[in-house]
Amino acid sequence: MRPDCKALAAALDGFGALWRWGDFYGNPACDGAAEYIAVLDEPSFDGSDDGELTCCRHSVALELYDNGGRAAEARRRELSRLLVASGFKHKRAGSVHIPSERKHMTAYYLNGWIEEGEADGRDHRD
């Protein structure tokens, strides 16, 4: 697991909501949960002129799903504070209601990080 992933996992564990890498679409684990977080990671690979992949840049978005209301807004601010305290600069988007999920979704876009020498096709989140 990348050090940044360990720090992010620790921050999310400290927040206390159900979370997972990837989305929750069709996953019964979130049924009935008051809040949950999908961690979406879009890696892009780069390398040397000879075609060798030598680094991987990650663009990470957290999608917090909740029931809305004042308590949910307080939790959204709490997640922002926790991310900053854990060293993750981010931009928080406004909350939108997702009718199909019957939830409100707030996205947090984290600044990307770069891994060097890790672009070998392995899943480094394990």
Image (cartoon, rainbow, N blue to C red):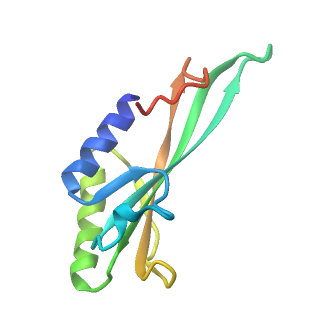
Residue occupying the point 28% across, 51% down: 12
Work out whether residue 19 or residue 117 is closer to the camera in this orientation and state it.
Answer: 19
Q: Is 89 located above or below residue 46 in the figure?
A: below
Residue at x-position 30% and y-position 74%: 32
Left or right for 56, reference 47: left
Q: Give the residue drawn at x 34%, y 55%.
A: 19
* Quadrant containing the N terminus in the rendered view: top left
Figure quadrant of residue 118? top right
> Which residue corresponds to the image point at 20% horizontal and 57% vertical from the top-left?
16
> Which quadrant does the C terminus fall into?
top left
Residue 82 at what x, y percent from top left?
24, 54
Q: Relative to the observer, which residue lies in front, 77 or 34?
A: 34
Please tell me how many numbered marks the rendered image carries: 0
Q: Which corner quadrant of the image does residue 58 belong to?
A: top right
Residue 36, image x, y percentages: 34, 64
40 to 56, vertically: above or below: below
Front residue of 7 and 120? 120
- Residue 49 at x, y = what percent? 79, 17
Relative placement, left or right, of 30 versus 117 is left
